[in-house]
Amino acid sequence: MEDVREGKDYNFPKEEEAILALWDKLDAFKTQLKKTEGKPEFVFFDGPPFATGLPHYGHILAGTIKDIVTRYASTTGHHVARRFGWDCHGLPVEYEIDQKLGIKSKDDVLALGIGNYNEECRAIVMRYSKEWEKTVSRLGRWIDFENDYKTLDASYMESVWWVFAQLHAKGLVYKGFKVMPYSTGCTTPLSNFEAGLNYKDVSDPAVLVAFPLEDDPDGAALVAWTTTPWTLPSNLALCVNAAFTYVKVKDRQSGAVYMVAESRLAQLPSKKAKKSADAAAAAPNGVAAKDAAKKEEGGAKKGGKKDKKDKDAKEAGAAAAPGLDTAAYEVLGSCKGEQLKGRKYVPLFNYFDEQASTAFRVLADDYVTDDSGTGVVHCAPAFGEDDYRVCLAGGIIAKGGDFPIAVDDDGRFTAKVVDFQGRYVKEADKDIMAAVKARGRLVSAGTIVHPYPFCWRSETPLIYKAVPSWFVAVETIKERLLAANAQTRWVPAYVKEKRFQNWLENARDWAISRNRYWGTPLPIWRSDDWQELRVVGSIAELEQLSGFKATDLHRHHIDHVTIPSKRGPEHVLRRCEEVFDCWFESGAMPYAQAHYPFENKAHMEANFPADFVAEGLDQTRGWFYTLMVLSTALFDKPAFKNLICNGLVLAEDGKKMSKRLRNYPPPTELIDEYGADALRLYLINSPVVKAEPLRFKKDGVFAVIKDVFLPWYNAYRFFVQNVLRLEAEAGGRFVPSSGRESGNVLDHWIHSATDSLVLAVRAEMAAYRLYTVVPLLLKFIDGLTNIYVRYNRKRLKGARGDADCRTALSTLYHVLRTVCCAMAPFTPFFTEVMYQNLRRVEGPSAEASVHFCEFPTTQAAVDPRIEQSVARMQTVIELGRTIRERRAKPVKQPLRAMTVVHSDAAFLEDMTGKLREYVLEELNVRTLHACNDPLQFATLRADPDLKVLGKRLGKAMGAVSKAVRELDTAALLQYEAAGQIDVAGHTLGSGDLRVVREFKAPPGTNPDHISAAGDGDVLVVLDLREDEELQAAGLAREVVNRVQKLRKRAGLAATDAVEVYLRCAGPPQEGLLQALHAQRDYVAAALGMPLLPAAHRPDTAVVLATEQHEGVGGTDCAPFELVIARPALVFTDQLSATCGGNAEHADNVRTALLARDHAALKAEAAAAEGKLTVAIEGQPKYSVTVAKDMFWSVGDSLKH
């Protein structure tokens, strides 16, 4: 094995870069794939990101999750193909080109040419692909970039065509209108998911508008409320609730007669309250909720719609004045909403007079509520989803027929609205309000501040607009979707059971077409009169129908292609202009990446659905949804079996990460500082893996290094150092045994703990609970370093003989290797670094990489008893330390005795038996006693579990709690034995009470001589009395501690041979020297050598370090000097006799041997059975005998 540097000198980023070079040399990823060929497939689908932006922490998080799961699958006997994918189409790419070329409208694109526009898009789609590959690889993720898939590839697009053709053949595709979030900046509809990405607080108009009823005897007008005056020119209907009572009131000042819902009378302008028109208008809806985006532009523009998201509107309505201002208004009468249904009213504008035969009527629907607005909703079916639905049901418009859409693709009024033609709708609000006022129809006007959706790309306000679109009839397969979802496992489960389930239950038909250019074209060819339509499912089919063989399926390559009509040449079929929504393309990824069904058909069908997918919470309504819809529609299966859903990574201040604000450390800089493994472990050990938000903290990444990696590394380094020491002393290579045959209790314990860790990791990974693994590792590493290595240091250093040392080292080797293999999927670099050194022990048969090794299996039965006993032992030690600290008794000061109090006889047997030596040594106590009578040292009391019992007992909790605290010792012992007790008429079971043991000193004991600590389970009692022997032992321990610190400051390794000398530097000397003499065996064992008097140090000794000390162990201790020196040869008087009595020759022999390398001399003597031959010119050869003529060190000479 190779020696390793100290933890403080270990550079994680540089070591990781060295591992990357090793993986390149091994071609590790491809090698792993080859090694697992023929094994069962573990199928993983990778959601495609856009390469037009750089990877951020959200991508890093998802990539880490994917890498861990797929690495684990590979080590557990699976072949795991991992292909990277790229989302190349859609609005994000087009937006970049629009910005680059100054494209503002469809006309600009047509002027440039769709071909030129699309080629501009193609040129940038892989702009940052190399940066992506570099970052992903640097994170340690193994994935195939060479065999990646791109949504722009003809093979991918052809499979998308096939998917669509299958849906059409199943009757799941139709063309219709849909009111959708619409970006006027990008001239395209957006999905509801995209519409929710970018909300801003804005100030909008809020107006009450009068709609006079025809033939009303009082000249009454229904009053509606809206925040979008620009929709008023397109008004075609009003809507009321048939069950509500509507009251007719007369304005005493103006004579105007208004009708609103009885419960909303307070919304009419009040003269009495002297409220501004601003407040009167804003009151009905207050601050609209963020999730009411659709209502704001398509629905909430009119007050009173029933929408569960209108929370703030309801609050504002409830806060309004409860009744009518009778000083300002006179009540004329009332009627039910049902009586208003069908009545005609005077249009606000005359732009759609041709609709008069069916339009400008009052409709009724229960989506109108009485907790906001006026109870009257103005309907513009082109600009509100509910408006469209209600007007369709009321016969105002016809399904599939044309209806007025007076706003063009750029968000400007068409010629139909002649007074505002060419005006951008949001900019026309004020002028429209002025026109309404001029017509005498404006009841009040004000403003409202509320969250409003903006386009996430163009930063322009969204509107809701009816657009012609092709739809997948999702609503018809809703039950199948729910059944498919039930077959999946989501982590965390609540995302599936609540968020996704609710989304599926309320699923609407999916608009899959976009009026754009850079995307997969819809494979629909139709005649001009729409009497003939053909859906093409493949390139071959297109060639068969048209004679054109396509090699590229983008618009500019196939828009010109026509298909002959069965009715003759005058009815030629041309392609519909739309392209697919890029969500449809990504949802088709399972089939399109494999070019299914044109290639890989058998393989795809045998390995579908995928075993695993993972992305962020935002994909619940995005990729996860589209995967589910398409797989269910095609195969009645989910697309995946297991899914991990992560949350959002936020800046440390809880805000969204922002390049502009620089409120987060750039990923590359963080990796360069701390390494990728630390970042990986930090992310998966956080709430973000449970779909919760994470406030990213750089200090958290450093904490992983400090709390996980460095302790782990130090245990590994300690092992390496002692293997090298053993090999140097024994002169041979260390070959580990199984270690399982050991009779040592801690060997047995660490093997059991290791097996428990392996079993636990297997169980958690099988359930895809990555976030539970790091706590398991932390607990294990703590036990490995603070129990096994710490308590076994002497054994591992060889203090108990060569055989026991080899057993301990073998145990530690197998533990370290097992943990490396178990944690390799999580920390691929760090485990590889350690494995590359550990594998040297195995020789050439070892796998070349830890990632080629199989995941560990348990080799023996886990022993719960020993694990519990050691855990309790550690508690005992920690309690003992607590007592020492509380009573100012440092651990270096020995104590007489300790008593462990517990009722578990098996535990006490372990404590006084095989675990005894570890407790005594750690706490520096001479004797350990066990006591199974808790009442000898403790009193018992009980505390009720208020959280558990409070819910169950309710009002009875007070009486029960009082009775519990009054229970006597006998009752509590009975409760512990029986597991239940009756208290105040209630039966309390196990876990309802916590029995607490509090220390009670035995009668006649001096409180200064005894102290105790407990954790409610075990009690530790320390005897604090002192005597001279204990003081001497404490002084010796202190001196040993000073020697060890001096060795460290001198930079000495554990394998460096030295001798230590002590010189008293002043009086009184007797106490120190007597103490060291009395404790000489302890000192020699602790240092691995005797502590030598300074007078014995030879002049030839090479001094490595010296240090003066005084005040050690109190004022009675003499000051002293420690000297650490290299071992020096010591020559006896016998050497002169060996040299024939020639003093000069003897001096020459001494000089020659002192000049030689110490280790070389030892090796030579070992080879010659303890003899050294010294040949010097001018004198005879002399044979010097070790332990007769000379000794290797002062310590050796004093032994003889």
Image (cartoon, helix red, strand yellow):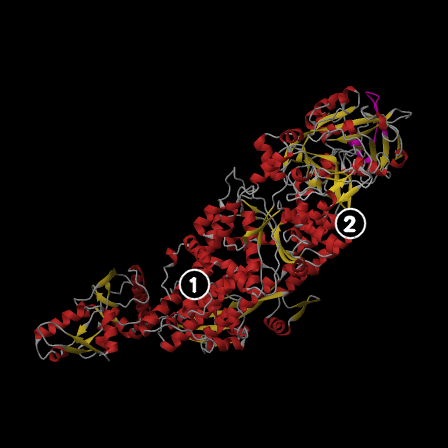
Q: Secondary structure at mark 1?
A: helix
What amino acid does circle 2 point to? Ala
Badge number at residue 183 = none
Task: Tell whether position 454 is magenta.
Answer: no
User: Can the viewer see residue 891 in this picture?
Assistant: no
Q: Position of residue 509 (x, y in %)?
A: 76, 45
Q: Position of residue 159 (x, y in %)?
A: 68, 49
For residue 804, side relative to residue 627 (left or right) = left
Relative to 787, does residue 599 appear above or below in the rendering? above
Q: Nearer the viewer, residue 1148 or 954?
A: 1148
Q: Secondary structure at mark 2?
A: helix
What amino acid does circle 1 point to? Gln
Relative to 145, does residue 201 appear above or below in the rendering? above
Residue at the limit of the structure toward the top, as seen here:
438
- Separation (CA) of disc 2 from disc 1: 57 Å
- Nearer to us: label 2 or label 1: 2
Specify few, some or many for label 1: CA neighbours under 10 Å numbering under 14, 14-19, or 20 or more: some
Among the 4 quarters of the image, the one containing residue 452: top right
Badge number at residue 836 = 1
Q: Position of residue 457 (x, y in %)?
A: 61, 36
Relative to 252, does residue 792 appear above or below in the rendering? below
Q: Which residues are magenta?
A: 248-268
Q: What residue would you read off at disc 2?
A: 169
